[in-house]
Image (spheres, grey):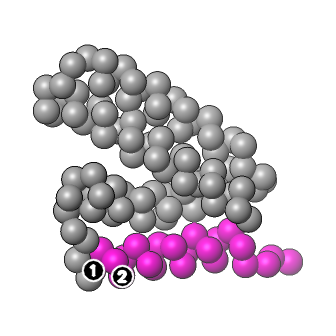
Amino acid sequence: MLTAILLFFLAGIAEIGGGYLIWLWLREERPLWYGTVGAIVLALYGIIPTIQKFPNFGRVYAAYGGGFIVLAVLWGWLIDRKTPDLYDLIGATVCLLGVSIMLWVPRH
């Protein structure tokens, strides 16, 4: 379970970090290398989920979506200095609960 969580975290950081670098390049007129590094990081994001042991592609990506919501809220708080409000925190908690149900509830 720890490996799965670590891979979710790494993929989330790659997706959000790569997207953020491209955002900085295109929206805040940073140098081209920001966009280039962002594109490479986003390509790594596409590779990381394939390391997961879960057999179902759709389930893994759906769970990643919920985890990314939580990471995006944390990114906004720590990097962009936008403090999440109560509804951000409630929404992130609901997403984590949904991810946990999708991945770790026993199935028959």
> Image point 29% across, 74% down: which residue?
88
**Residue denoted by label 2:** 90
Membership of 98 in magenta stretch: yes
In the rendered structure, which amino acid carries the disc numbered 1? Tyr
Membership of 33 in magenta stretch: no
In the rendered image, which quarter is residue 83 located in? bottom left
On the rendered structure, is 73 left or right of 81? right
Measured as percent of width and height from the top left, residue 51 is found at 72, 43
Is 42 drawn above or below residue 69 in the view shown? above
Residue furthest top in the image: 32
C-alpha gap between disc 1 and disc 2: 5 Å
Helix, strand or loop status at disc 1: helix
> Image point 25% across, 71% down: which residue?
84
On the rendered structure, is 76 left or right of 69? left
- Quadrant containing the C terminus is bottom right
Is 69 drawn above or below residue 12 in the view shown? below
**Dots 1 and 2: beta carbons under 8 Å?**
yes
In the rendered structure, which amino acid carries the disc numbered 2? Ile
